Image (cartoon, rainbow, N blue to C red):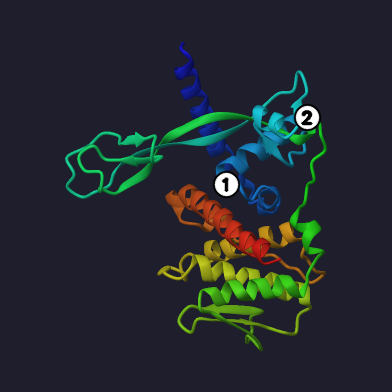
Amino acid sequence: MNTKTKASDRVEELTALIDDKIDALMADNDWVNTLKFMSTQHNYSWQNQFLLWWQGLATGTDITYVRGYKQWQEIGRQVRKGEEAFDVLAPLIARRCAEKGCSHKGRVIYNRATKSFYCPVNEAHRVEQFLTGFRDVKVFDISQTEGDPIKMITFKDKCENASDEIWEALVSLAESHDFQVELRSAGSAEGYCSHQLKKIVIDPSNDFGYRVKVLAHEIGHLLLHADIKDYAQQRARYETEAEGVAWVVCEALGVHSDGDDYSFGYISTWGGENTKANVKKSLSSIQKTSKTILDFIESSL
């Protein structure tokens, strides 16, 4: 069997592993442990978060920070002899002409002088990237390396629990989408997000840390749920997405309070035969939205 076939087989194995672990999540509804790992690896896709988490569990490795073999060498660290690599999936990206009606169906040409791609039919045509598949990439955790120390700064180190700066960053994120944040009674709820009124309301009676958590939840709704039409039928799923976003963001920031009460819907209620597809979509939404919020906060601090 040639190397290309082996690589293809390995991608299939890893994809199957993700599917198996989705089944496990669907069976035990263990959102907390799933999201706990996501909060430490929010820059990775949800698929790679799943792969790293389960490989860490299988090997007894507390995975915190991974890089490729040569990437470690570039920053003065060396993977110790005999260490087993972990697998992640990297996208294979190609480019093609995206101009409507263009006769060219193949890949475009790279101009080394301008460092750009162009269509051989017409250089003015628009060129876009597209995904052709995935490849297996080997990575190692920092615990498997030795060498020059590197400064590791986590969100928890930077944020020192709930702070006015975090609250203000979340408010600024809402305002960047033309939403107003108000502290007042939210009726029977602890907060709500209205896309119609472009307003987020947070009940001020809870302690400060919990208000930060509720605001992160409502911003999850702001970013994810503007156009949904089936909220009544899929309430558990959409609330779990917003709670998932709040959990990942607050865990990454080290922002929790004694009053925290996270409520995750049961996956079994998520749509019959489409449940697995919905779970995958929700995990992707939680990862991407959490990253958007954390990137915004980091740039603001």
Q: Is residue 231 left or right of residue 127?
A: right
Q: Nearer the viewer, mark 1 or mark 2?
A: 2
Q: Is residue 152 above or below residue 174?
A: above
In this figure, which residue is indicated by the disc labeled 1?
A: 46
Task: List x then y, in percent, for residue 185.
Answer: 66, 88
Q: Is residue 158 left or right of residue 228?
A: right
Q: Which structural element holds mark 1?
A: helix
Mark yes or no: residue 264 visible. Answer: no
Mark yes or no: residue 165 visible. Answer: yes
Task: List x then y, in percent, for residue 214.
Answer: 67, 73
Three-letter residue code for mark 1: Trp
In this figure, which residue is indicated by the disc labeled 2?
A: 145
Front in this rendered view, residue 222 or 90: 90
Q: Which mark is residue 296?
A: none
Task: List x then y, in percent, for residue 24.
Answer: 61, 42
The residue most toward the front is 113
Q: Residue at x 20, y 38 (%)?
A: 104
